[in-house]
Image (cartoon, rainbow, N blue to C red):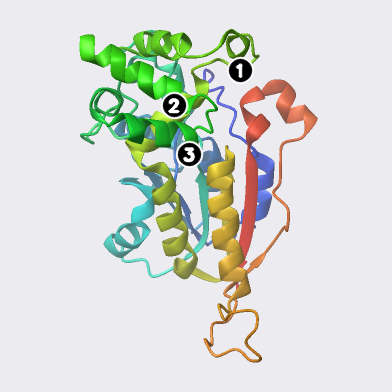
Amino acid sequence: MAEFTHLPVLLHECIEGLDIKPEGIYLDGTLGRAGHSREIAKRLTTGRLICVDRDQAALDAAQERLGPWMDRVSLVHSNFCEIDAILDGLEIPAVDGMLFDLGVSSPQLDDASRGFSYMADAPLDMRMDQSDTLTARTVVNEWPREELRRIFSQYGEERYAGPIAAAIERRRTERPIETTLELVEVIRSAMPGKALKEKQHPAKRCFQAIRIAVNDELSSVDRMLQSAVPRLKPGGRLAVISFHSLEDRIVKNALAGFAKGCTCPPDFPVCVCGKKPVIRLVSRKPIVSGAEELEVNPRARSAKLRVAEKL
């Protein structure tokens, strides 16, 4: 195991936020390279850890990475938004804690063949779950120009969404766009010179948008949150790490709704909906990485951790 060098984001803060009980039941909804799972599992005695991932490759690798603790680990191939089905299948009514790291796992980014990276040439894929049917190639070559413009603008917050979508439409009428670097070339061709000189790679925002669309990431996050909170035991903790503003907004608003309870209009003199708060926010503001972590793990720069406790 000496080669294991993965740096899980906000590790200490996550473990502290989960307030792990040795006999508790925990769910890591985004197993990835098992960095967070290892630290949870080693703190359990009679407890249990359920590790979920959409990527079968992550589950296969976990057999070795979690080897010393596999007697207390269950591996599940599923989307984290299917929490109810996952827990029902394991006959577990509620858990003591859940962790979700919403970033794309390092193996997916580092494996050029998966098509997530704009830095290496590969077929346009971007599927987190290789058994899914929708790929980046389908999005780029078959989705209407207006839909491409919408996702580039909404999911990627790309200023030049319109010109880029138009350039893709023109190019694909000549021949399909097959690879990541072909797409990068088309994106570059649609952007003004000043944008190409910016520090951020010109294709970063569009690639993010396509990845989100292919994997239905934003609606999955919302469905996950709506399912996760009810399946926590009283005193159970929910920890969610997000990496861009769209995800963080969904997490923030969902948790605020569960913490507020009442949904009556502000001008109502008394509450008539009867809804009560079901969680408390452990920290009002998101927890972010410190200088020490950023020095060794630059990918943590945009990470935001929010933690809530079931009432």
Residue at mark 3 to residue at mark 1: CA–CA distance: 18 Å
Report the mark closest to the observer, 2 or 1: 2
Q: What element carries label 3?
A: helix
Q: Which circle marks residue 162 in the picture?
A: 2
**Where in the figure is residue 57, as x and y percent of width and height?**
33, 29
| Label ID, residue 129 | none
As displayed, is residue 300 above or below residue 222? Answer: above
Observer able to see residue 178: no
Q: Where is residue 166 in the image (x, y as percent from the top left)?
A: 37, 21
**From what the image shows, is residue 124 above or below residue 148?**
above
Q: Mark 3 belongs to which amino acid?
A: Gln
- Give yes or no for contact between labels 3 and 1 (Cβ–Cβ under 8 Å): no
List the residue tagged with mark 1.
Answer: 200
User: Label 1 is placed on what type of residue?
Assistant: Gln
Q: Where is residue 92 in the image (x, y as percent from the top left)?
A: 36, 66
Which label sits in the foreground, 3 or 1? 3
Q: Which badge, 2 or 1, is on the more N-terminal residue?
A: 2
Left or right of 115: which side holds 303?
right
- How far is disc 3 from disc 2 in space, using C-alphas? 12 Å
Q: Earlier in the sequence, mark 3 or mark 2?
A: 3
Mark 3 = which residue? 154
Q: Which amino acid does label 2 sit on?
A: Gly
Query: Image point 60% across, 28% down: which residue?
Result: 7
Residue at the spot x=28%, y=31% of the render? 144
Between disc 3 and disc 2, the foreground one is 2
Mark 2 secondary-structure assignment: helix
- In terms of secondary structure, where does tag 1 sit? loop
